[in-house]
Image (spheres, rainbow, N blue to C red):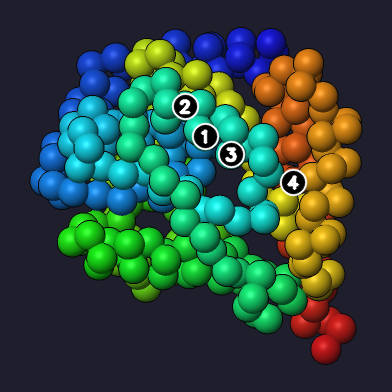
Amino acid sequence: MAYNLAMANLVGLMDAAALDAKQERLFATLAGLGRVIIAYSGGTDSAYLAWAANRVLGNHAIAVTADSASIPESHKRDAEDFVRRFGIAHEYIETHEFENPDYLKNDANRCFHCKDELFTQLEAVGQARGIAHIIYGVNQDDLGDYRPGQNAAKIHQVKAPLVEAGLSKAEIRELSRVAGLPTWDRPASACLSSRIPYGTPVTIQNIKTVEKGEEEIFPDSMSQSMAEGWRSGAAKALERENAALLDAAPLAA
């Protein structure tokens, strides 16, 4: 509840006309692409992008989710519920990051290897179907963070329409709320591999152990916002620990 109230206070300060103008800019960008594949995780940003692409392009926009062990089954169910509710074309595609030793060793570039694999698979789908453009839900605020996945997006020439429209996270939440999207107040939640500290190898076994533990801590009766809020806080704490490890690494050499 406190999270929702804080968001409501923030978005209430926004200029509705300016937000509408940014959304129209997004729609125009999507229209110019013609046919797209959306890298869709079901989070706030990718859900809003999938909704917008579907509104503009209809069945010429396909949301594709990685069928990866690193994505909690509960997130997949939520992603499926969203696309079903809004009539968005949706598919899964297998990714094989757990076959990559560079991913398994779990260093600071783990996210690069994950996104590199995802975009490689999405490129194959696009080539097979004659779809030239892959888009993903990075937003303006993300550009200042350490996100190796953005490097993978650049290599694969994946487009970022939310950035092109100048949309921040808070603005995406507000536009999602106005559009009636249930994801508008969903806290950020990283993949299961992010629960494993840098330097500890990632395996399907250890992330599934994490997933099982989280399911026991957060039963279905607990609100999604409460559960995701805890996960987000835990992930951020681990990110701080990982950052400290990285800072200390040169001293240990």
Between the residue at mark 1 and the residue at mark 3, the CA separation in whole angstroms equals 5 Å
For the residues bearing labels 4 and 2, Cβ distance under 8 angstroms: no
Residue 155, position as x, y percentages in the image: 37, 73
Residue 142, position as x, y percentages in the image: 48, 48
Question: Where is 35 relative to 157, above or below?
Answer: above
Tag nearer the camera, 4 or 2: 2
**Residue under label 4:** 235
Question: Where is 181 relative to 105, above or below?
Answer: above
**Residue under label 2:** 82
Q: Amino acid at mark 1?
A: Ala
**Residue under label 1:** 79
Q: Amino acid at mark 4?
A: Ala
Which structural element holds mark 2? helix
Mark 2 crowd level (few <14, some 14–19, many ≥20, 10 Å Cα) = some
Which structural element holds mark 3? helix
**Residue under label 3:** 76
